[in-house]
Each structure stands twice: as C-alpha cells, then as structure tokens.
Amino acid sequence: MENLIDYLNTSDLSFVETAGGFLEMTYAGEHYKRISVYRSFPLSDTDEFICVRDKDNKEIGLIRALSELPADVAALLRKHLDLRYFTPKILTVNQIREQFGFTNWNAETTRGHVEFSVRNEHASFVHLTADRVIVVDTDGNRYEIESLAALPAKELRKAVFL
C-alpha cells in the first residue's frame, strides 16, 4: 500500500525568505519558489503537521513538527504561519451592543483596540472547548477568547451564542 502522507525529511530541507517577503525552499536537490505553509490543525497543534505547498498550490509534503527544524528556520516558518492565521486574542470586552441581529463589540486584544460586528448566529462562534471560543466577525476576521470565564459576564450575556 502506498504511503498517503509524504513527510519531508527535515535534514534535507532549507528555507529562505526573498527580498519580497516570499518563502523559497530547497528539498532533496529541488528548488521551489514562492512556497506556502499551512497548519493542518491551526487551532490545536499550531507547530505540528505543517503542510508545504508549491506556487501552484500542489502539496509538496508535511513537516511533522517545527521543533525538528533549526530554531531560526522554525521562527521563519512560524512568522509566515502567523501572518496566514492572524487571530488576535481578546483580552477584555469593554462593551457589546445588540442591534438588528448583530452584536457590536468594543474590545482590547493582543493587537490593540478593536471594534467589530458579529452576526448573532451560531456559525459566528466556534467553541474549541467549553471555555475557549473563536469569534468570527462580519468581515471574516477571527478573534480568540482564551477563557470566557475571564471576561465580564455582563457583556458576554449579550452575545447570544456564547
């Protein structure tokens, strides 16, 4: 039976970032320009099972864990992954206002102050655990609430699906 997962041999990998900010990779003597990296499990195993794709979005293979790479290479890939999976964490909720089937949020995040709107529907709130939630706003931006218990209950009651 053929191996369905092509794990990349990390000892035969090298990555560089171009002057334009793109990633290039050399693997097993073959050079790939403008590769992309993706997390197979972006919410739970952020540094494991990293998918590498070529410029045509064809899968080259998987890196089992960033810890298998030299620290500088792992940092470079993590930088590109963090750009793709930009998800600020909500530190505090200042106010949530309900209006016409939406909730308008005023919050502080790990990336600063934000104001955004969320549709009051179940799909806008992805429960990762009983206490950890991803909030998806009307523009598709994602925000993480690491602990519902740590935020003001008075405001969170207004967010119907939390």
Image (spheres, rainbow, N blue to C red):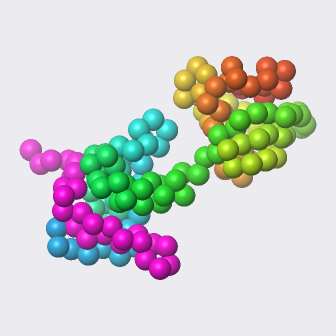
Query: In the picture provided, is 56 more to the left or to the right than 157?
Result: left
Q: Residue at x 18, y 62 (%)?
A: 12
Q: Tell me where residue 79 appears, x and y as whole percent.
A: 48, 58
- Depth check, front residue: 9 or 125: 9
Query: In the picture provided, is 97 more to the left or to the right than 157?
Result: right
In the rendered image, the vertical position of residue 43 relative to residue 57, given as above or below: above
- Depth check, front residue: 154 or 77: 77
In the rendered image, the vertical position of residue 116 relative to residue 77, given as above or below: above
Q: Residue at x 60, y 27 (%)?
A: 132
* Range of magenta residues: 1-27
In the rendered image, the vertical position of residue 151 relative to residue 101, given as above or below: above
Query: In the picture provided, is 86 more to the left or to the right than 9?
Result: right
Q: Tell me where residue 50 appears, x and y as whole percent.
A: 35, 50
Seen as rendered, the residue at the extreme left is 1
Q: Residue at x 71, y 35 (%)?
A: 91
Seen as rendered, the residue at the extreme front is 71
User: Is-magenta flag for residue 39?
Assistant: no
User: Is-magenta flag for residue 12?
Assistant: yes
Examine the rendering and report whether any part of residue 109 can be seen: yes
